[in-house]
């Protein structure tokens, strides 16, 4: 892969947790995209309770990338090349987001956006690609960053199969600085970098693109955002590779690959589908939590309820494996590993080694494919949480 960034720029990104590249997007492109976002906000945005131009933050996101004029910025060569230079490998677009802050919006507060319950924020390797569509200055409202704050979070055990991270201590935050972003600049920002967005003083809209990309070897622990076909079709043939998956059927089902790691080799729990020797992964009908908002795709809350009621298992976390066809929709499959889980009372089911599953079901069976994907050594996995576990994401 040919890097568009210098070694020094990449080193600066990893040292500071962010990198500014000036004038990546032309003034003509930013002006036109700004008008498109304003028009989209006037036609309806998230949250639906906001009616433009009332004060507030308007979000145009996700599958609205299919709206005319929105998709080119997601595959802009200057943006994608820089993102992939940081990763050192190809990227997936995990979130398409345009924010419009109408005059009177109070801005944000200091935070970082690694969040285990969010499809757009639960990868172990993702970054922001932020492009102001007007200057982010004192008048419109700056975007402040805390250099080095990404280092407050660290991986507990880099050799673990499923990675965990430490809770950052906000009391240790380095001072915030203003990178003086202008329209068309590109801010690449690490997922753990703290940032702040004070309100501005202007009587005009503050508009920007806040896309998120993950490395292809680091799928979001909560699962990918479910793009539809129209979103994928809005991309050029070359840009379609940025869309990790797309389907027009809804996520209606969720399943859990439960791995026991207490023995000489891992074992997996299957439950009886019909009492006649047909086996399936535990789980059942799944749905979004009410508080998911526009950031859809995490079915861990449903999965927790299902395994608690059917297996009496308290599921502290789960990690996305894949999506599979299901009756009337799509099943989102997660994995969970524990050295003590097999000792519990998990209802009607049996434990099988990987070889036993292969002999019983065959290599092409969906369950065997899930086991194989779960153990891919080239993938970096983290711990996903339910939306209702926001306050316990580091527990």
Image: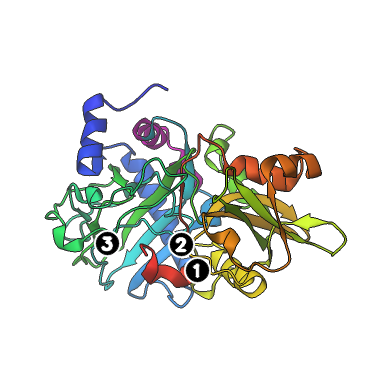
In magenta stretch: residue 216: no
Q: Is residue 93 left or right of residue 100?
A: right
Mark 3 → mark 1, Cα distance in angstroms: 19 Å
Up-down relation of residue 132 to residue 44 (above or below)? above
Query: Residue 237 location, x and y as percent?
Result: 59, 33
* Label pair 3/1, CB-CB below 8 angstroms: no
Disc 1 marks which residue? 292
Earlier sequence position, callout 1 versus callout 2: 2
Earlier sequence position, callout 3 versus callout 2: 3
In magenta stretch: residue 74: yes
Q: Is residue 278 left or right of residue 288?
A: right
Q: Residues within 10 Å of mark 3 (few under 14, many from 20)?
A: some
Q: Where residue 335 is drawn, which disc sits there?
A: none
SS class, disc 1: helix
**Residue at image coords 47%, 33%:** 90
Query: Residue 51 location, x and y as percent?
Result: 43, 75
Q: Which colouring convention does the figure follow?
A: rainbow
In the picture, the quarter occupied by the C terminus is bottom left
**Residue at image coords 30%, 51%:** 192
Q: Where residue 117 is drawn, which disc sits there?
A: 2
Residue nearest the viewer, comparing 277 with 189: 277
Question: Can I make out residue 91 in this image?
Answer: yes
Q: Residues within 10 Å of mark 2 (few under 14, many from 20)?
A: many
SS class, disc 2: loop
Is most of the magenta stretch helix, strand or loop? helix
Query: Residue 75 location, x and y as percent?
Result: 47, 38
Q: Where residue 111 is drawn, which disc sits there?
A: 3
SS class, disc 3: loop
Q: Bounds of the magenta span?
A: 70-86
Question: Can I make out residue 21 in this image?
Answer: no
Up-down relation of residue 101 to residue 162 (above or below)? below
Query: Residue 325 location, x and y as percent?
Result: 73, 52
């Amino acid at each position: 892969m040919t890097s568009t960034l210098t070694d020094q720029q990449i080193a600066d990104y990893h040292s500071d947790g962010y990198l500014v590249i000036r004038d990546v997007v032309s003034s003509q492109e930013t002006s036109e995209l700004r008008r498109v976002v304003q028009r989209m906000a006037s036609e309806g945005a998230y949250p639906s309770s906001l009616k433009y131009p009332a004060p507030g933050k308007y979000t145009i996101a996700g599958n609205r990338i299919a709206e005319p004029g929105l998709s080119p910025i997601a595959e802009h060569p200057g943006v994608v090349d820089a993102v992939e230079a940081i990763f050192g490998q190809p990227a997936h677009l995990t979130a398409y987001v345009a924010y419009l802050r109408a005059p009177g919006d109070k801005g944000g507060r200091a935070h970082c956006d690694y969040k285990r319950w969010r499809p757009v924020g639960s990868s172990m390797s993702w970054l922001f690609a932020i492009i102001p569509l007007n200057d982010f200055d004192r008048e419109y409202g700056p975007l402040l960053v805390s250099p080095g704050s990404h280092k407050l979070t660290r991986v507990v055990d880099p050799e673990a199969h499923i990675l965990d991270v430490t809770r950052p201590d906000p009391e240790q935050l380095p001072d915030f600085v203003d990178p003086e972003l202008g329209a068309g600049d590109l801010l690449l920002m690490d997922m753990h970098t703290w940032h702040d967005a004070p309100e501005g003083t202007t009587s005009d809209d503050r508009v920007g693109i806040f896309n998120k990309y993950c490395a292809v070897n680091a799928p979001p622990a909560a699962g990918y955002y479910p793009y539809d076909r129209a979103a994928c079709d809005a991309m050029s043939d070359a840009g379609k590779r940025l869309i990790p998956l797309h389907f027009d059927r809804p996520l209606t089902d969720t399943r859990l690959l439960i791995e026991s790691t207490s023995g000489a080799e891992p074992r997996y729990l299957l439950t009886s589908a019909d009492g006649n020797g047909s086996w399936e992964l535990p789980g059942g009908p799944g749905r979004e939590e009410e508080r998911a908002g526009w950031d859809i795709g995490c079915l861990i809350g449903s999965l927790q309820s299902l395994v608690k009621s059917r297996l009496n298992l308290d599921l502290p976390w789960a990690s996305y494996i894949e999506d599979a066809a299901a009756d009337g929709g799509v099943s989102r499959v997660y994995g969970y590993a524990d050295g003590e889980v097999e000792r519990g009372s998990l209802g009607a089911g049996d434990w099988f080694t990987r070889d036993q599953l292969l002999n019983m079901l065959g290599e092409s069976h969906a369950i065997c494919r899930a086991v194989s994907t779960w153990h891919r050594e080239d993938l970096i996995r983290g711990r996903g949480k339910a939306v209702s576990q926001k306050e316990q994401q580091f527990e």
